[in-house]
Image: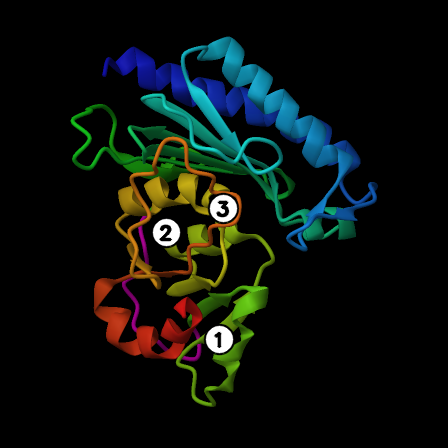
Amino acid sequence: MHQDFWETVLTFCNTTTTQVGAKLIQDFGQVQATEKADGSLVTRADQWADEALRDAIAHAFPYHGVLSEETTHVFPDTDWCWIIDPIDGTTNFTRGIPLWGISLGLLYQGTPVFGYVAVPPINSQFFGFWFGDSGLSGPTGAFQNGKAIAPSTAPPSSNQLFNLCARSISVLKHDAFPCKIRMLGIATYNLLTVASGIALGGVEATPKIWDIAAVWAIAQAAGATWHSLSPDPIFPLIPGKNYGQVAYPTLILAQETLLPTFLPLVQHLGK
């Protein structure tokens, strides 16, 4: 791909999430949520933000498909597709906890090649390019606020962090867990703290495709180790398949050498 294309993609994500994020800040902690069929929460802010993102994509990239948490869960039969989550961390958003984000993942032929996650309350923007065996070319690396990020090289200890999600607290049955535990309430940032060197590891027991598509590319680009707790491959996604109820239990680690330490503690989450 031409360099201009990737510059357009990055500028689009920065501009669009800045605009949507500024309006979401006004609604932050001020809206009521309702419960969806899967038990997760949704607000009118999720719904208008979803519409704003989809409209912006349709205008800037009319030949790209879109899969969104709040609307279309069927993966389209297009070479390029955006997978979006207008508010990751809706519970935090509704309760006034300043950790929630906007997630945009760009897939080529079913596999993420670019990810962008904005976390407006802490003024952080993460992005990364990961082309793998797609045949595409362009910029490389992963970044937070324009600065390159990489996972930690520290060994496990009581002064290092490991993130759980609400559905993985069974991990706490292990009395001698090798790190301090944190629970952030936002899947994307949970995993991004590993890619950016804050935590040594993180686990998400039931993330959906919109929780992980953008982060998958960023984590790969940063050099983190992504380990699926399910035997089935995540990517490429299949055109025409409905991904609304598909979960992807995931372990992410700062170093591949940490797998023997942490995998036995969390692998039951994939069953």
Residue 180 bears which disc, if any? Answer: 1
Check disc 1 and give the amino acid type: Lys
Secondary structure found at label 2: helix
Residue on which the image places disc 3 = 211
The correct choice, above or below, for 2 with respect to 155 in the image is: above
Near-viewer residue (219 or 107): 107
Distance, label 1 to label 2, CA atoms, is 17 Å
Near-viewer residue (46 or 95): 46
Secondary structure found at label 3: helix
Mark 3 or 1 closer to N-term? 1
Give the crowd class for mark 2: few <14, some 14-19, many >=20 residues within 10 Å. many
Mark 2 or 3 closer to N-term? 2
Query: Quick one: quadrant of the N terminus?
Result: top left
Near-viewer residue (36 or 130): 36
Check disc 2 and give the amino acid type: Ala
Mark 1 or 2 closer to N-term? 1
Q: Which residues are magenta?
A: 150-159
Give the crowd class for mark 3: few <14, some 14-19, many >=20 residues within 10 Å. many
